[in-house]
Image: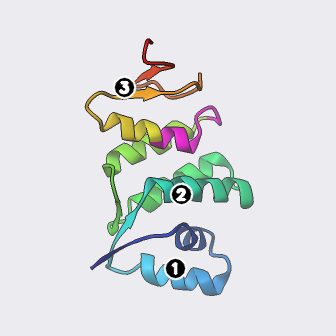
């Protein structure tokens, strides 16, 4: 059996707050069930942990990397290795947003590896970043 994880479950599990909901989240996540996580849930979880809980970016990256390495957690669309690489792009500084890193991950797994972005900080490693079709 498998199911998709929602941001609320992941955040409760990772923060342990509130304890009653964290316990319910742990019952699901620490089970043997095959669980899927979307890139949207990863981005939203990163946002909640940094913005609402005030957890430093480096700690959020490390926590999400460890979470993705659980044996029963699987990305719903991208390869796990690619998602881990994307998260690590966010670790050094606030220069690369979690959302941009996840768009980068999606681009890495496409044939053309092209991203249209007006953001000068968009990660360029392994992808072609264009401002327009004429670029």
Mark 3 to mark 2: distance in Å?
Answer: 25 Å
Residue 28 point in image, percent of width and height? 43, 81
Of residues 103 and 82, which is closer to you in this image? 103
In terms of image quadrants, where is residue 2? bottom left
User: At x 42% / y 25%, what residue is drawn?
Assistant: 125
**Visible in this render: residue 54?**
no
Of labels 2 and 1, earlier in sequence is 1
User: At x 50% / y 36%, what residue is drawn?
Assistant: 89
What residue is disc 2 on?
A: 63
**Visible in this render: residue 124?**
yes
Residue 15 point in image, percent of width and height? 63, 69
Of residues 111 and 75, which is closer to you in this image? 111
- Is residue 3 depicted above or below 134 in this figure? below
Of labels 3 and 2, earlier in sequence is 2
Mark 2 to mark 1: distance in Å?
Answer: 16 Å
Secondary structure at badge 2 equals helix
Of labels 1 and 3, earlier in sequence is 1
Residue 71 point in image, percent of width and height? 32, 66
Of circles 2 and 1, which is in front? 1
Marks 2 & 1, CB-CB < 8 Å contact: no
What residue is disc 1 on?
A: 25
In the figure, is residue 55 to the left or right of 41? Answer: right
Q: Which residues are magenta?
A: 93-102
Report the residue that reaches farthest toward the front.
Answer: 133
In the figure, is residue 109 to the left or right of 85? Answer: left
Report the residue that reaches farthest toward the top.
Answer: 134
Other-residue count near label 3 (Cα within 10 Å), few / some / many at <14 / 14–19 / ≥20: few
Mark 1 to mark 3: distance in Å?
Answer: 36 Å
Residue 36 point in image, percent of width and height? 36, 66
Secondary structure at badge 3 equals loop
- Is residue 103 depicted above or below 61 in this figure? above
Q: Which mark is residue 126?
A: 3
């Amino acid at each position: 059996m498998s199911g998709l994880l929602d941001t609320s479950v992941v955040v409760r599990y990772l923060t342990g707050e509130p304890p009653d909901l964290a316990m319910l989240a742990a019952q699901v996540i620490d089970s043997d069930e095959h669980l899927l996580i979307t890139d949207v849930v990863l981005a939203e979880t990163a946002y909640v942990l940094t913005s609402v809980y005030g957890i430093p970016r480096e700690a959020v990256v490390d926590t999400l990397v460890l979470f993705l390495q659980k044996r029963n957690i699987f990305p719903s669309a991208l390869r796990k290795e690619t998602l881990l690489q994307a998260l690590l792009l966010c670790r050094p500084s606030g220069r690369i947003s979690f959302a941009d890193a996840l768009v980068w991950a999606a681009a890495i797994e496409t044939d053309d590896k092209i991203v249209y972005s007006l953001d000068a900080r968009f990660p360029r490693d392994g992808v072609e970043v264009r401002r327009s079709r004429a670029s």
